[in-house]
Image (cartoon, helix red, strand yellow):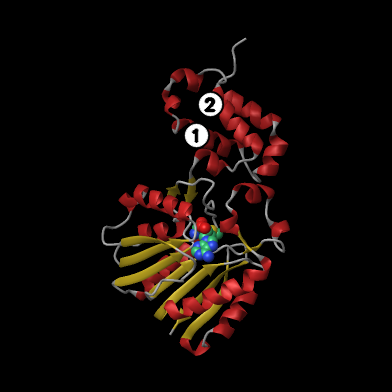
Amino acid sequence: MALPTLKESLHNFYESHEDNLLRDYPGLTISRLENDFKRFLEKSELSFDPLILNGPNNSLSEKFFSSLKEGIPLEQIINEAYFYKSEFFVDENVLIPRNETEILVEKVVSFIRKIKKENISLIDIGTGSGAIILSILADVLNVKINALATDLSAKALEIAKTNAFRLDFKIADSHQLCFKIGDRLFEIEDKFDIIVSNPPYIKESGDRFKVHERVHSYEPHIALYLKDEEHDEWFNTFFKQVDESLKPQGLFMMEGHEDHLNYLEKNFRELIDVNDYQEIKVVKDYTQRDRFLWALKK
Ligand SMILES: C[S@@+](CC[C@H](N)C(=O)[O-])C[C@H]1O[C@@H](n2cnc3c(N)ncnc32)[C@H](O)[C@@H]1O
């Protein structure tokens, strides 16, 4: 009897592990798995060996299957995540960019198009893979953007640099992008037209039960959590810095936790002079969950 091909092995694996796979990878379909398996093989120098593609089970597929059994996120297995309009390199040192964050990119890009300025200064705080800032830079062509990507994690910043290098061909030459390691806006004296951030916003204990076990196990805690007792002060300090660093008519847009955004918006209003702002609001995502804080200066 002929041994199964890799495709048959994948189908057999999916069928015999379906319950566990759907527990660890909610909504995972066999076609998504097939696609990611193909990407995984393509990235291996062995993938061009026809014996491996058409032949029986081998160590490459075993490696893929054992990573799946462990529950390692697919994006980390294939070192690739699709976000907005681009593919980003990811590993265990960065948050896997999420679909809902694309709304932040969309809103900022349309803001940039609307204000019709020739030069814009932009900072992304907690850039991680660089998904937000690189997506904005790649999508805006006729405005010159002076951009700064920052992160507290040196390893994350290295990955953002890797992605900037890989996506360079999509980014207009007129844009400028620098990187800086650091905590929030400490040690940054420049002022900005746009401040964006998807900071760590999950309370380490209080919100822990809302976090999927796989996310907790495999994504960097520096990207996810703030200590419960430090949460409010962390944001208060950040908001004061934002207020000081935002130019007139400048926009601050931050992703946050759906359960805390209204509270954070209230704190933001108390910390700044509301008369300096045209608009301060919580923006919902497409499933009507509170998702972003939006503050626009006069
Ligand atoms: C939720 S992740 C967001 C990553 C990326 N911007 C995205 O949207 O996919 C938060 C990021 O903030 C970084 N970070 C954590 N604490 C920070 C701090 N105090 N100052 C700056 N960055 C910080 C983490 O290293 C992580 O890369």
Q: Which of marks 2 and 1 is nearer the N terminus?
A: 1
Q: How many labels were placed on the picture?
A: 2
Secondary element under disc 2, as helix, strand or loop, is helix
Q: In which quarter of the image is the N terminus?
A: top right
**At 49% from the left edge and 68% from the top edge, which residue is drawn?**
184
Q: Name the residue under label 1.
A: 40
Q: Which amino acid does label 1 sit on?
A: Phe
Give coordinates of residue 163: x percent, y percent.
40, 50
Q: Can you say whether 248 is above or below 199 in the image?
A: below
Q: How far apart are marks 2 and 1 (CA)?
A: 9 Å
**At 42% from the left edge and 60% from the top edge, which residue is drawn?**
133
Mark 2: give few (<14), some (14-19) or many (20+) Cα within 10 Å: some
Give coordinates of residue 62: x percent, y percent.
59, 26
Q: Quadrant of the C terminus?
A: bottom left
Q: Residue furthest top?
A: 1
Q: Is residue 211 left or right of residue 130?
A: right
Dot 2 and dot 1 residues touching (CB under 8 Å): yes
Q: What residue type is labelled 2?
A: Leu
Q: Can you say whether 145 is above or below 271 in the image?
A: above
**At 65% from the left edge and 51% from the top edge, which residue is drawn?**
216
Q: Can you say whether 283 is above or below 98 in the image?
A: below
Quarter of image, res 231: bottom right
Q: Which residue lies furthest to the bottom in this view?
A: 275
Q: Nearer the viewer, residue 19 or 167?
A: 167
Q: Mark 2 points at which residue?
A: 60
Mark 1: give few (<14), some (14-19) or many (20+) Cα within 10 Å: many
Give coordinates of residue 282: x percent, y percent.
58, 74
Specify the label residue 73 is tagged with: none
